[in-house]
Image (spheres, grey):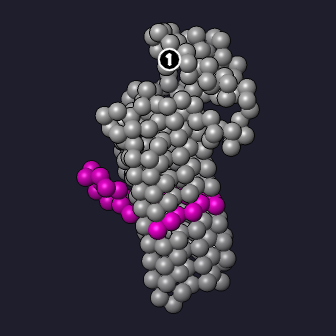
């Protein structure tokens, strides 16, 4: 049987794995599923349709599955799906989706959400992502795997954050944040600051891949070529580097424009 504190409220219908722990004054709604070895600390609230994978830790005062903060939402059935091995620190909030955005908020695995960080409706978050304190996603944001959203930073609705991107603290992102690249700055002056070399080295990228990205960066953002011309040149000369190909595809697919 799961270990459930006597002051916790677990509604009938909730599906809780045998090895879970439910802390004091915690609430688990009737449409919640929690995987093995997950821990819900004190004052955690899981409500609405929420599916949680294995070995997730909700430290304290975490709220997952609340209705979206969207005036168009009229109570339709939507949900949150969370992978495994994630850590949700104090006062983290994750809202459900909306019908217009597909109805599902998805978080991958091995994510660290530090205190007060927030994921809004219809967001999609990949694996191995770090949200520093008070990092905030507006609705419909896509965050790629292995990326970092810095403390007190905000990502505008419908923006994308690429794989292995690094967003510095106190940044406001109103266009797509490029994969593999550091982006830092306030709303009026957020700029890119080169390849996220240290982060990529820590993730095991080869010297050849990092050098290919540096060369692509110089052509795309430090040459006199128009962006379309630079993209064609990078693709022709460096397209054999997988990471460079991902960067080129990300730029070509952007609908909001990119932070530069």
Which residue is disc 1 drawn over?
Answer: 222
Which residue is located at x 48 percent, y 47 percent? Answer: 149
Secondary structure found at label 1 = loop
Compared to residue 32, the image places residue 117 above or below, namely above
- Residue 232 in percent (x, y) is at 56, 11
Residue drawn at x 31%, y 34% as measured from the top left: 188
Percent across and percent down for residue 195 are 57, 31
Point 66% across, 77% down: residue: 18
Magenta stretch secondary structure, dominant = loop
**Identity of the residue drawn at 42% across and 67% down:** 91
Above or below: residue 6 compared with residue 190: below
Could you tell me residue 158's position as x and y percent? Answer: 39, 38
Q: Is residue 235 left or right of residue 183?
A: right
Q: Quadrant of residue 196?
A: top right
170 above or below 230? Answer: below
Q: Is residue 251 visible?
A: yes
Answer left or right for 207 relative to 54. Answer: right
Towards the viewer: 179 or 7: 179
The x and y percentages for residue 190 are 38, 34
Specify whether residue 30 is in view: no
Question: What range of the chain is rendered magenta?
Answer: 66-90
Q: Is residue 84 magenta?
A: yes
Q: Is residue 147 magenta?
A: no
Outermost residue, bottom side: 6
């Amino acid at each position: 049987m799961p270990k459930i504190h006597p002051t916790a409220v677990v509604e009938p219908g909730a599906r809780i794995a045998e090895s879970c722990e439910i802390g004091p004054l915690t609430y688990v709604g009737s449409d919640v599923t929690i995987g093995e070895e997950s821990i819900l600390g004190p004052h955690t609230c899981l409500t609405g349709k929420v599916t949680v994978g294995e070995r997730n830790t909700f430290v304290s005062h975490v709220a997952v599955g609340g209705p979206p903060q969207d005036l168009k939402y009229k109570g339709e059935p939507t949900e949150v799906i969370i992978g495994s091995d994630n850590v949700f620190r104090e006062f983290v909030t994750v809202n459900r989706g909306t019908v217009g955005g597909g109805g599902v908020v998805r978080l991958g695995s091995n994510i660290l959400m530090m205190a007060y960080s927030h994921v809004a409706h219809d967001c999609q978050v990949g694996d191995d992502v770090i949200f520093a304190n008070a990092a905030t996603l507006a609705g419909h944001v896509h965050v790629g795997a292995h990326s970092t959203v810095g403390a007190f930073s905000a990502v505008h609705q419908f923006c994308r954050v690429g794989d292995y991107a690094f967003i510095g603290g106190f940044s406001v992102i109103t266009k797509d944040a490029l994969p593999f690249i550091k982006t830092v700055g306030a709303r009026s002056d957020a700029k890119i600051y080169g390849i996220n070399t240290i982060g990529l080295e820590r993730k095991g990228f080869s010297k050849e891949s990092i050098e290919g990205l540096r060369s692509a960066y110089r052509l795309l953002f430090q040459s006199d070529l128009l962006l379309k011309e630079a993209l064609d040149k990078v693709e022709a000369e460096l397209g054999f580097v997988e990471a460079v190909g991902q960067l080129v595809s990300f730029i070509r697919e952007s609908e909001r424009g990119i932070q530069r």
